Image (spheres, rainbow, N blue to C red):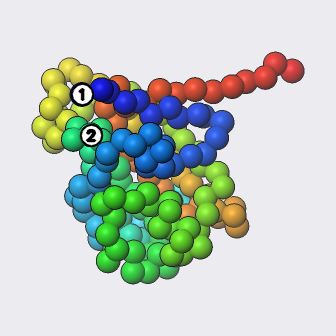
């Protein structure tokens, strides 16, 4: 099987799912969690909402060409996405659903990327060795109204992404 890497252009917002579809790479999401819960301090601060506000938390594994590649945890204020928990989220980009069904169009995201040690659960889910590392991508997405609408954490196998950026000298 040919390995595929997603190129993440650090200067341009794009959908991983759309990139995979464009390249005719089979993928699906395995739902791990979808619940309405309360925002804890990290989520509340990043989304600029009151502590204990209702949020929708989604956790899903992205499987690409039959191989687990990411575990994504997404948290969105529930007032913005009522009913999203009832939609099928297995083969579609969440950003596509948010735009089509809720009128939320992402215009910016702020991300932080780091290497992390895997948990026992991640070692099992990704078939890793104990001393392997994973990428952790934490971010906040902003809509046209410049309000944050999504906090996310993505745990990724290190061979799935290639990061690129362009910087002009002044």
- What is the C-alpha distance between the residues marked 1 and 2? 8 Å
Asked whether the beta carbons under mark 1 and mark 2 sit within 8 Å of each other, the answer is yes
Q: Which residue is mark 1?
A: 1
Helix, strand or loop for disc 2: loop
Which residue, as the protein is rendered here, is positioned at the far front? 24
Which residue, as the protein is rendered here, is positioned at the far right? 170
When asked about the image quadrant of residue 9, the answer is: top right
Please determine whether, in this image, residue 114 is positioned above or below residue 50.
above
Report whether residue 55 is seen.
yes
Query: How many other residues sit within 10 Å of disc 1, few (<14), some (14-19) or many (≥20)?
Result: few
Report whether residue 68 is seen.
no
Q: Residue at x 31, y 31 (%)?
A: 157
Query: Which residue is nearer to you in this view: 27 or 102?
Result: 27
Residue 138 placement, left or right of 109: left
Query: Which residue is nearer to you in this view: 165 or 142?
Result: 165
Q: Residue at x 27, y 45 (%)?
A: 63
Q: Residue at x 40, y 43 (%)?
A: 24
Q: Residue at x 48, y 56 (%)?
A: 151
Residue 14 image point, x, y percent:
56, 46
Query: Which residue is nearer to you in this view: 71 or 3?
Result: 3
**In the rendered view of the protein, which quadrant contains the C terminus?**
top right
Q: Which residue is mark 2?
A: 65
Residue 123 image point, x, y percent:
17, 34
Q: For the image shown, how many numbered marks are present on the structure?
A: 2
Residue 47 image point, x, y percent:
54, 61
Residue 85 placement, left or right of 7: left
Helix, strand or loop for disc 1: loop
Residue 105 image point, x, y percent:
61, 63
Residue 7 placement, left or right of 38: right
Query: How many other residues sit within 10 Å of disc 2, few (<14), some (14-19) or many (≥20)?
Result: some
When asked about the image quadrant of residue 87, the answer is: bottom left
Please determine whether, in this image, residue 72 is positioned above or below residue 136.
below
């Amino acid at each position: 099987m040919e390995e595929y890497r997603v190129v993440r252009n650090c200067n341009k917002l794009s959908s991983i799912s759309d990139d995979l579809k464009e390249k005719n790479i089979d993928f699906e999401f395995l739902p791990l969690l979808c619940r309405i819960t309360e925002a804890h301090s990290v989520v509340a601060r990043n989304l600029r909402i009151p502590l204990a506000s209702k949020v929708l938390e989604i956790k899903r594994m992205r499987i690409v060409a039959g191989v687990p590649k990411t575990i994504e945890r997404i948290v969105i204020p529930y007032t913005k996405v009522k009913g999203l928990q009832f939609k099928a989220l297995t083969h579609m980009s969440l950003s596509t659903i948010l735009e089509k069904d809720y009128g939320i169009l992402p215009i910016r995201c702020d991300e932080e990327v780091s290497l992390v040690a895997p948990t026992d659960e991640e070692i099992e889910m990704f078939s890793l060795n104990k001393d392997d590392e994973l990428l952790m991508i934490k971010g906040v997405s902003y809509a046209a109204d410049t309000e944050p609408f999504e906090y996310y954490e993505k745990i990724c196998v290190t061979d799935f992404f290639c990061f690129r950026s362009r910087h002009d000298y002044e």
